[in-house]
Amino acid sequence: MTKIERCSDAAVLCRLYGEFCAEKGAITLPLDTETFCRVFFQENCIHLAAWQGNRPVGFASGCADAGRRVGYLSFIGVCTDMRRQGIGRALLHALEQELCTFPFVRRIETVFFNPVHLPWLILVAGGATHPCMPGTDQKSALYPLLLSDGYTEWTVQNAYYRALAGYTDPPTLAKTRARLLSEGIEVTLYDPAEHRDLAGLFDDINNPGWGAQVLAAVDQPIVVAVDHTAENLIVSYTGPLSTDPGGRGNFCGIGTRRAYRGRGIGKVVFCEMCRRHAERGATFMSLYTGDQNPARHIYEAAGFCIVRSFGNLRKEVVLL
């Protein structure tokens, strides 16, 4: 008989997680115990283990966010030889019940807002990794389980990848850049002494999350588009430019003021970032965006290809 209960033994859970990561075709990365604890053992996190006698055969983890009034599913896995016995569904239901003990939880989701960031392997990229899963891997066993258990998919996050060795701009970019310069718009690196209202850009695009990350990293190079006809107003950004130890050029979003959209500014800004990342030694870039997000056309024009798709799924909580 399988028993499911809360588990705080990091060594047991980390070892079990490592078994799942070692399976053929898995994209999750094994973690040492210290890293596992840093990733999974956060505020309002819940960990469950399924036991067959003294043997742990399944692991489920989730967390709750009071600000968004959401419970997140972070991970559910069952040992290969114990699958198709209902253990995964039992872990899912047990985790849902535990998350609903937080009185503020109104729905349960799998989405990139989850503070538990699971690094994953980009299989087509020879060992390159991305720092977080932005939802449920559509090729995983968990994806059809959630769909069959009342979860609905409201969007898909596509993960993009591009090697940066030998990066060159798209053929039409030079013409767009020249046109923008003739209109007084220059793409360059942010200079706080010369360029104005970076914070206001994030107000205009209504993305305080990106703003907080970028404004906390102004000591690093940030690619911006500046309108010299408007007193050096910053009208677009991407960056900051930093490189992970694995060679990934970081990407913290791209945004253009609403009044300046439709002029090709975002494409020039993004390609400028790619070129500078390559010059600074980054070997690849990876990112994700919603399949209906117009920004995908910027990434695809720069030579990025979809390497994985993740579902953002949701189930509303029935309050008793």
Image (tube, grey):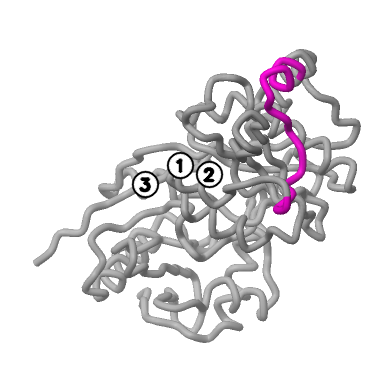
Dot 3 or dot 2: first in sequence order is 2
Q: Which mark is nearer the camera, 3 or 2?
A: 2
Q: Helix, strand or loop at disc 2?
A: helix
Residue type indicated by callout 3: Leu
For disc 2, the marked residue is 201
The answer to whether mark 2 and mark 1 are in CB contact below 8 A is yes
Q: On screen, 105 above or below 28?
A: below
**Separation (CA) of disc 2 from disc 1:** 5 Å
Residue type indicated by callout 1: Asp
Residue type indicated by callout 2: Leu
Q: Helix, strand or loop at disc 1?
A: helix
Q: Which x, y percent locates residue 242?
A: 77, 54
> Quick check: 251 left or right of 77?
right
Specify the quadrant that holds the N terminus.
bottom left
**Separation (CA) of disc 1 from disc 3:** 29 Å
For disc 1, the marked residue is 204
Question: Residue at point 43% right, 45% down?
Answer: 206
Inspect the magenta stretch and tell me whether residue 185 lies in it: yes
Question: Residue at point 76% right, 44% down?
Answer: 189
Q: Which residues are magenta?
A: 178-193
Dot 1 or dot 3: first in sequence order is 1
> Quick check: 199 left or right of 111?
right
For disc 3, the marked residue is 313
Specify the quadrant that holds the C terminus.
bottom left
Q: Helix, strand or loop at disc 3?
A: strand
Q: Which x, y percent locates residue 296?
A: 57, 29
Report the front residue among 156 and 200: 200
